[in-house]
Amino acid sequence: MKSSIFFISNSFNFDASVEDLVSSLSFAGTLIEKMESDKFISFFKSSDFYENAVNKIFGPNAIPESGLLSSLIYDGALNRAKCKSVDSSEILQLVNKEKPELDGNWISVFGDFPEPPKVNYENRKVNTEQDIINFSKGVVLENTYTCQEYSDVFEGIYRNLIFHPSYNDIENIDGGVENFISGILDMFDVMNSYVPTDGHTEQDIKFINGKIKFTTCEEGGGKKRRKNKESQLNFSFDIDGKIKSFNCEFHCKLEYFDNQYKKGKYHNNNRMYFGFNKGIKDNNKILIAHLGSHL
């Protein structure tokens, strides 16, 4: 089960000012460009999506900026959202069901919808990247996945993180990934929304450790006892077409099952190793090197 975001006939206010409408359409396009992938999140339009747009662009009330609006709707990233053969009212009926399923995905709608028909589940109305993440997290928590599917889930939802192509060691999480899933999502949620500071990593580790329940720290003196380069937790990442090696000794310890923090069985062998790609103006990122057993 994956997550789908629907644009329906009243997702955008076509009676708003041109500036506001252009801003809304442009922002929706940037969300599609960033969040869409075959791993987890997809975007669609209802069959009647274009009805409100046509009058503004082609009808007797067409405005001088109709060319710009047409380009945003028909030629821009918004056009990547394919039309489904279900109309807006049918989409809203599905969204208001306990399990909002369509074609194997759980669905939400883009927009505010302050007037009837309303969306009864707040997390199924999305307007921002974080809204999409929160909705997708809900989908994950209500469904089951294989270890490979969980790997795709994390990469598909958390688009600000850079995942190593071999990061997936999820099947070796002691106790089973499903018993840590809420904590893992919270961990990636914090990291995804955090921009690492320039310079030393101490402040970064302190921030993450204070926000999640998994103990977060650096390898410290133990790294010096590791005998070879690979075991010293240096990982190579492709950054903008260039292969670079990064110190990924920093780690989160997946110690306790969800809802059993410091009162359930202690698991000593689970780790998520990560590093930092710094020195990029306003775009420092966290690198996810390994999720699974202790290295």
Image: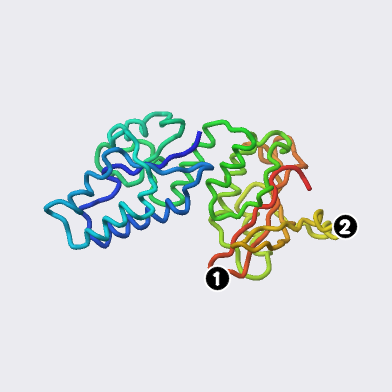
Q: Percent from the top left, x then y, of residue 229? A: 82, 58
Helix, strand or loop at mark 2: helix
* Left or right, residue 7 beside residue 240: left
As drawn, 218 above or below 150: below
Q: Percent from the top left, x then y, of residue 21? A: 27, 57
Q: Residue at x 32, y 33 (%)?
A: 85
Q: Earlier in the sequence, mark 2 or mark 1?
A: 2
Task: Tell me if label 2 and label 1 are in contact, CB under 8 Å.
Answer: no
Q: What residue sits right under mark 2 in the picture?
A: 225
Total marks shown come to 2
* Residue type of the residue flagged with mark 1: Lys
Q: Quadrant of residue 175?
A: top right
Q: Percent from the top left, x then y, of residue 5? A: 40, 42
Q: What residue sits right under mark 1 in the picture?
A: 281
Q: Residue at x 26, y 36 (%)?
A: 117
Cα–Cα span, label 2 and label 1 = 35 Å
* Residue type of the residue flagged with mark 2: Arg
Q: Residues within 10 Å of mark 2 (few under 14, many from 20)?
A: few
